[in-house]
Image: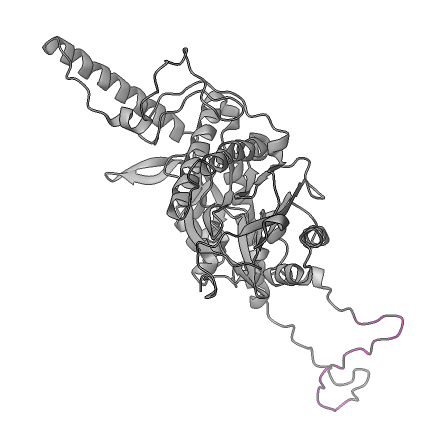
Amino acid sequence: MPPTHDDDRTPDTDLFLRYVAHSEIGLVRKNNQDSGYASPHLLVVADGMGGAAAGDLASAAAIQLIRRADRNARGEEPVRGEAMLELLAGALNQANDKIADLVADDHSLDGMGTTVTGAMFDGAELGLVHIGDSRAYLLRDGELTRLTHDHSWVQSLVDEGKITEAEAAFHPHRSLLLKVVNGQPAVEPDTDLVPVNEGDRLLLCSDGLCGLVEDDELSRILTRNEDPDAALQALIDAAHREGGIDNITIIVADVVGDSTAATTGAKILGAATEREVPIVTARPVDLGDRTPTRRTDAEGNTIPDSPAPQSSPPDEETSRYAPREAPRGGRWRLLLAGLVVLILLAAGATAGWAWSRTQYFVGPADGKVAINRGLSQQVLGVSLSEVYRIEDTALSDLPPVYRDRVEQTITSTSLPDAEATVAELQEMARQCVAQREARLTPEPTPTPVPPGAPGNPPGAPPTEPVPPTPTETEPSPTPSPATLTPTPAGGEC
């Protein structure tokens, strides 16, 4: 049940935030691809991905654009309610366009992306925007509520009842995300309005914390440590105890009724403090764009191509869709315009086809696992993909859960990513085959002792063999757990 306001105050009562924030590399990674931002009115965590493809750049670019919403929200008339969601969703779309521009300017960045979990605060409610698997929590009266829903493959398996939450924590594909901010069109984040009360505690974090530490432990830490700094340090320590295998970004914010207890000023975290976001030139607007993209500086502000006019510029949306005068000049001008349109459409189709050749996914082919190049969708019954390579792994050797996922296709960000997925499927198939062979291997049949043999006098009937008695110097061997055939994650074979 979503949180509600207490009955003894109205939603118009102004509350304040006292927050602490931290971002670090962790104990294993070589660089921090997380970024974050915290202010009295806006809390954001972004977890970049892409490795060599610059996940740190993706998260830094997202924070650069989204934190501008904080400045816009503090105008002459503060933004409240649904307007917070519109402002945050628009900022996230601008961040998505920025990442698309960066990839178009430097194709080596293809594959980078970032999660975004943000909360704008108007003094009574939180406006939540979320995409990916970073999380937001609310602690009220000792009860911890998860405010966001992971956009991950393993979460979809949990939702469908195919695996448990415990299995999801150790699933080999727990890092596979279904929705991220990666420059592709149609970015649709989850949005929600959450009322808050004085005494509530908020937690926003990347999966370097929530991917390693269970919700029950998070609840105990947040409840036991009343001081925000102590709670923050205890959360960091908990992530380290679990191995600290990922970047760790945490924001803890208490909702307070006294403005003197609130935190002032803003804080930028992680890669956003170190990674410079390049200035990119404008790219052509295609049908997937929501707004035209222009050159921007390090703060995300538009760089004009020529001196700005003295008069106030027209509203962008009004200008974009305003009626225009009909062209003059007769049918030759119309024919020329039509020819230009055809050339642009052909160029767009060619560019789209070339881009699709860089996309890969894992799917079935001839009863086996295969890597396909292109898009898994069909248009008017025409396939947009081709089989790139058929592997030796048979679908029948996979656990049912993974067999179903392969048949539904598994999207990959690149060819190496698809090959890594195939390697994991091969290992699961090998484990399943070993399990089946172990179940089919018959138990050895004891050989009777013939008459006249030692221990069985002549004329006596054959007797059952007597197993040797173990001696102190030769104890009976006991299989160790390491020699037992493991059960693949996701269910029995």
Q: Quadrant of residue 48?
A: top right
Query: Is residue 469 part of the magenta span, yes or no?
Result: yes
**Is residue 236 visible from the viewing direction of this image?**
yes
Instruction: Please indicate whether residue 127 sits to the left or right of residue 223 in the image.
Output: left
User: Which one is nearer the viewer's eye here, 361 or 399?
Assistant: 361
Say above or below: 235 vs 297.
Answer: below
Instruction: Please indicate whether residue 96 sits to the left or right of residue 41 in the image.
Output: left
Say above or below: 165 vs 463.
Answer: above
The x and y percentages for residue 100 are 44, 28
Boundaries of the magenta span: 458-476
The x and y percentages for residue 334 are 14, 13
The x and y percentages for residue 12 are 44, 54
Q: Quadrant of residue 276?
A: top right
User: Which one is nearer the viewer's eye here, 307 or 50?
Assistant: 307
Q: Quadrant of residue 329?
A: top left
User: Which one is nearer the viewer's eye here, 117 or 140?
Assistant: 140
The x and y percentages for residue 13 are 47, 55
**Is residue 388 visible from the viewing direction of this image?**
no
Say above or below: 210 vs 266.
Answer: below
Q: Residue at x 47, y 30 (%)?
A: 99
> In what quadrant of the picture does the N terminus appear?
bottom left
